[in-house]
Amino acid sequence: MGNQGMEELIPLVNKLQDAFSAIGQICNLDLPQIAVVGGQSAGKSSVLENFVGRDFLPRGSGIVTRRPLVLQLVNHNTEYAEFLHCKGRKITDFEDVRKEIESETERLTGANKGISSVPINLRIYSPNVLNLTLIDLPGITKVPVGDQPPDIEYQIRDMIMQFICRDNCLVLAVTPANMDLANSDALKLSKDVDPQGQRTIGVITKLDLMDEGTDARDILENRLLPLRRGYIGIVNRSQKDVDGKKDIKVALAAERMFFLSHPAYKHIAHCMGTPYLQQVLNQQLTNHIRETLPAFRSKLQSQLLVLDKEAEEYRQYQPDDPTRKTKLLLQLVQHFGLDFEKKIEGSGDQVDTVELSGGAKINRIFHERFPFDLVKMELDERELRREISYAIKNIHGIRTGLFTPDLAFEAMVKKQIIKLRGPCLKCVDMVTEELIRTVHQCTRKLASYPKLQEETERIVSTHIRDQESRSKDQVLLLIEIQLSYINTNHEDFIGFTNAQQRTREPCKKIAAGNQVIRKGWLTISNISIIKGGAKVYWFILTTESLSWFKDDEEKENKYMLPLDSLKVRDVEKTFMSSKHMFALFSTEQRNVYKDYRHLELACDTQEEVDSWKASLLRAGVYPEKAGEDGENSTTDNFSMDPQLERQVETIRNLVDSYMGIINKCIRDLMPKTIMHLVINNVKEFIHSELLAQLYSIYDQSALMDESLEQARRREEVLRTHASLKEALDIITDISTSTASVPLPPPINTSWSQTSLGSLRRAPPPIQPGKRSPSGPGAPSRGPAPPAPVPAPQVSNSNSSDALTQPSSRPSRAAPSIPRRQPPAVPSRHPH
């Protein structure tokens, strides 16, 4: 083989397979192996039995191999078999091996030709085998039998593809000689997964069953449908020989004599037959393992590194150790508190990139949703003036009032202050719901301990609800405080004189500079319908105008819309649109944009719509109120004299001035109140009281009971980590610093571009400029094709016997059979 280190590579993979057998496909590691692929009755089972020298595989008609069989051949002084599912039981009677395969197959697939992709692992120790690992896959079938599903062909193909599509799997494509090679399903599948032919080895069986006058010489010489690794011919026992219990050693001797005596094959007899195939597979699998081992080791190390931290945590956890449970409980509660605080403060290590949550969501509630709800509630001009007029008249009674009554101002202010309760309580509700949602997100990390997760979430949520009630009481108290005393001496209050002056002179807008308030993408929905429907533009909102551009480079200005007399109204979604919409319109009944009375704008989410409304509110664009549109409004059922109108306008100005003070105060106090009574209080409760309350309900043993999923996960991680570490240790102990036979050079694969069914058994056309082989065993068929592939070599030795001996050690020799030294044949391949 080259050296002992190389010879131990195949047993190394066997050890790795045993190490991974307990964890299945968890690691998704691809071990080097050989998969045997072929149609039904192609002779796959006979090839494997010839390797072992024993009859041990099930026989019969139809699909016999119904589960993948992982066959590990180990050169050993004694002969016995061992199944992985009943490890430790040594089977010396190979008839029992056959029965065990059948019973284990039926255990998963049933007795009526069902199939399963779960493999059976069988290891055979024998002095007559070379170290080899093969996977015997079910034969490719076309017609379902028994209780097989109608798509049995595709199921078997999918099962085969699961194995042969792996880069570390060599494909042993078995094709009988008495069928057209161009119709070989095995070669077709191998070409699908290995178009360069780097992993495919061809095997031609049943050479003795070909029609008289025909032979497979062109195939075996790799001239018809060539493969990079070439073809090897095999002669199996016939069904009559199998039924008659013909000894396999006698069959191997007959196979040898067949190749030596056949006129078409005797010149290549030295590289034909079962013993040679076994040696080639041993050597090529060894080389393949050596080539793939560095990448396999790297993948093994990376997977081990991923599991290191988790495995270390699980190793430290001991389910029956109360001190460990107490320590872990303290750590989990502490981490929960830190996670909650990070979610609120915005300093978490896991930042949500999909939507607003935690502190960011609460900040939007404080500074966008709450102010917007205040303004939406506050401004209803027509109804407000009607109420003021009624209040003035009712205060004067039967008298005709000469002066504006201050009682009317106080009554209207108190009525407006009472209306603030709704938005304030709604703000508390929204913040509370977001806090509870944040607690739920933070407790997901406690899912491994269901009782701890449930109680933690319950205790903290209950405390949040208690603080919500306290906060609402405080908010109502703030409203009552504002109602208790109307401070007309406030420095920002305009007073009666200024209110009357404002009535005579319309209020001029204070110029504060055209400041940019917001930028972003919006969809204009109700224009350009003929030109292609809604369009997306880049919008810039300032204190004076709303402009939109072609893109965010802000070079091509499409339009600039002044904000004077504009208001916002809600627009319902249409069934053809998934976007959320709102509209801008003019209170002066003029066109907003070209011939359009309103401008419909759309966002992807309702949250974006609310955010834009809040930004428009900062620019002085207020929301529309019910009945505010002049077209839909009803006329008053009474008229006011000029004196009453002046009084109403004066009270209106006073109310507007005082409510501006109140709103400013409420917008400032509400976030402070909620922060103090709810958010900060909950953070302090988690850090100082949560652990005590947990202990008062359960002891730590009950709280720290693992979930079944967590227990399975812990066992799985520890088992996987141990298997990976064991595998890495196994690989580390093997030295692969040795020379190996290189892969044969690439060949002309243009044949694969042609339909396989159109090919015929004929040698390819002769190319000029090439010489035909000569020598004692050379055929007389004319010039040879260009640069055929050399037969796979077994050793680096230069001796002429290198192709027939697997190793210099006697224990590695092939089965002892009569052999005749083949005649010396000059090389068929130019170097």
Image: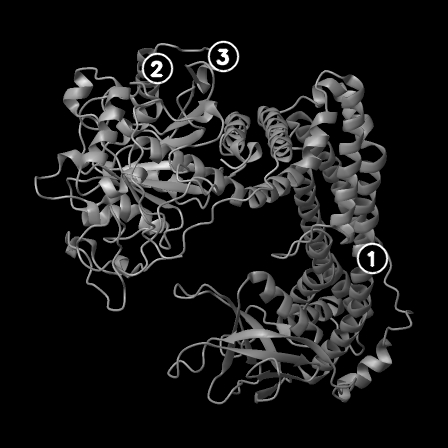
Q: What's the residue type where badge 1 is placed?
A: Leu
Residue 663 versus residue 181 in the image, above or below: below
Q: Nearer the viewer, residue 750 or 146?
A: 750
Give the distance between the C-alpha atoms of the residues marked 3 and 2, in whole angstroms.
14 Å
Number of numbered discs: 3
Residue beneath disc 2: 97
Q: Nearer the viewer, mark 3 or mark 1?
A: 3
Left or right of 118? Residue 705 is: right
Q: Please give the name of the residue rendered at 39% of the width and 66% of the height, measured from the top-left corner.
A: 576
Q: Are marks 3 and 1 in contact (CB under 8 Å)?
A: no
Give the distance between the C-alpha atoms of the residues marked 1 and 2, in whole angstroms.
84 Å
Residue 88 is tagged as: 3
Residue beneath disc 1: 669
User: Which of pointers 3 and 1 lies earlier in the amino acid sequence?
Assistant: 3
Q: What's the residue type where badge 2 is placed?
A: Val
User: Which of pointers 3 and 2 lies earlier in the amino acid sequence?
Assistant: 3
Q: What's the residue type where badge 3 is placed?
A: Gly
The picture places residue 30, in percent across and down from the top left corner, at 49, 39
